[in-house]
Image: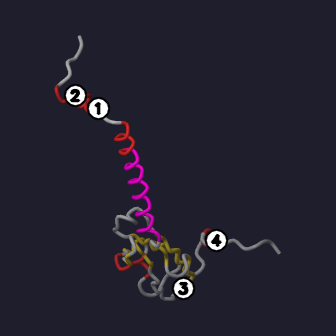
Amino acid sequence: MARRKSSAQKAAESAVKKSHPVTVFLVILFLIVGCVGGVFASVQLTKNDCFELKGESVIQLDIGDTYTEQGVTIRSFGRDISEKAVRGGDADLLKGAAEEGIYQIVYTVSDIRWGDYQRVRVVIVGDPEGVEDYLPQSGGEA
């Protein structure tokens, strides 16, 4: 059994049939120009954005040394939002004199641009087991 079309469907089909080819071309042209303009604006707004560790990503300390926080630099849509950075991971374990071990400080920020990103700083105190996994390999054998 054939389904009857509603008056809205009939009106829509009639309007599409009456669309001039120039109108269709202009609609497509404006859609393309709008998309290109949006991409260009997005690139311009975010071209200087960054989420970077200040200082080294791997720091070595002697047992008993005190860790000095270096922080991160965060720019989102051209604004400096570094003060919104949240330190997590082992950050609390490094307050005061450090004990031997490998610590990871995880930096995150609650921001639409950097919401899923994180930066990690590794702090190595003393000479714990597994330290070679975090240090650069030497050039070769002597």
Residue at disc 2, secondary structure = helix
Q: Is residue 45 magenta?
A: yes
Q: Earlier in the sequence, mark 3 or mark 2?
A: 2
Disc 3 from disc 2: Cα separation: 78 Å
In the rendered image, residue 120, in percent from the top left (x then y), is placed at: 48, 71
In the rendered image, residue 59, in percent from the top left (x then y), is placed at: 55, 80
Residue under pointer 2: 9
The magenta region covers 28-47
Residue at disc 1, secondary structure = helix
Residue under pointer 1: 18
Q: Nearer the viewer, mark 1 or mark 2?
A: 1
Q: Nearer the viewer, mark 2 or mark 4?
A: 2
| Quadrant position of the N terminus in the picture | top left
Q: Is residue 136 magenta?
A: no
Disc 2 from disc 4: Cα separation: 70 Å
Q: Amino acid at mark 3?
A: Ile
Q: Amino acid at mark 1?
A: Lys
In the rendered image, residue 19, in percent from the top left (x then y), is placed at: 31, 35
Q: Earlier in the sequence, mark 2 or mark 4?
A: 2
Q: Earlier in the sequence, mark 1 or mark 4?
A: 1
**Crowd around label 4: few <14 · some 14–19 · many ≥20 (10 Å):** few
Marking on residue 63: 3
